[in-house]
Structures are given as structure tokens and as C-alpha cells.
Amino acid sequence: MKLFVQEPVVQDTDTNTSIPSWPVKELLFDMRYFVVISILFLTGCASTGNLPPSGTQFSLDSCPPFLNCVSSTSTMGLYSVAPIRLAEPLSQSSWELIKAVAIELPGASLNSARFGYADITCRSDLLGFPDYLELLVASDKQHLNVRSQSLIGFYDLGVNRRRVELLRSRLVERGIAIN
């Protein structure tokens, strides 16, 4: 019975030395799968792309085909969350309150904001994974569209939906939004 298996070797004719013959083709084949899976794992779309430099006359991006996103503009039930109904039409003072409440969410930091649109990153407590939260006032100024998506992973364990509902409940508590 052999306890050790000797690796196949190839004789290098230039240096007259023996080198191990590794299964290079299999290794490269496995690396391709690793790279593809890594790219899929790390790309989750971020916040809405191609934002105009000003105004709110655009819409939030849709959710990717992973279970790591919720959006009030989504038509698919898995990703859909109701927009936040504002108690009164959006004003500068109510917008400042909305941003302040959003930044009070756990792990939240403001990336960019302008009247009617905010891009916020929320980091998880344990490992600091980034999630993106976007707020965009609807054209009627009576509703706040929201989109929350995990940057990493295919499934968010319901974190994004809970974040949006926490934001909604805190805005209702402050009298900014209504149920």
C-alpha cells in the first residue's frame, strides 16, 4: 500500500531539471468559473446610474434579478414596496427632515443629495457590507419613491425591505409621512 503518491514530473530540457506537471488546463478552467462567479457576486448594481446633474425628472433604476433589492417603482411583487406618502407636498424644510431621518438609520451615511433626491449608503453592523438607499420625490411631490439594494450578494435576508419600512415608520412618527 502506497501512502504517498508521487506527482508526475516533466524534464525541462533547457535547464535539465525536473518540474511538477500540474494540471494547468484544469486549473485555468476552474479559474474562469471562479472569476465569473466572483463578478456576479460582487456586481449588484449600485445606485441609479446616469443621474441628470439637477432636478428630479428621472426614475430610479429597477432591481436586478437577484433577491437583494426592493423598490417602490418595481412592478414585480418580489421587489415591490409601497412609496412613502408624504403628509404635505415636499418643501425644502420637509426635505431636510427626510434626509435627517434617513441618515439616522443604522450605519447610514449620505453620499450625495439635492432637493428631492438622496443617495445614501447603509453599512451592516457585523461585517460592514454596503447597501444603497435612494430617495426620490415623485412628480406629484406627495410621494417619496425608495430603492434599497445590497451591493454584495444575491439575497439580502429581507434587510432592504426592513430598512425601507423602518424609514417609513420613523417618518410617520415625525409627522412627515402618513400610512
Image (cartoon, rainbow, N blue to C red):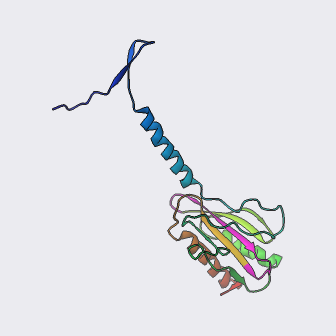
The answer to which image quadrant residue 122 occupies is bottom right
Q: Quadrant of residue 93?
A: bottom right
Asked if one can make out residue 111 in the rendered structure from this viewpoint, the answer is yes
How many numbered marks have been drawn onto this rendered protein structure? 0
Residue 3 covered by magenta stretch: no
Compared across the picture, whether 111 is left or right of 79 comes to: right
Query: Which is more toward the observer, 142 or 16?
Result: 16
Q: Which residue is the extreme one toward the left?
A: 1
Image coordinates for residue 19, horizontal then vertical, percent: 39, 21
Q: Indicate left or right for 110 with 68 as reference.
A: right
The residue nearer to you, when weighing 77 against 120, is: 77
Q: Is residue 55 left or right of residue 24?
A: right
Quadrant in the picture for the C terminus: bottom right
Give the magenta range.
Answer: 125-143
Where is residue 43 drawn, in percent x and y? 59, 55
Query: Is 142 situated above or below 136?
Result: below
The answer to whether 143 appears left or right of 167 in the picture is right
Q: Is residue 54 above or below residue 79?
A: above
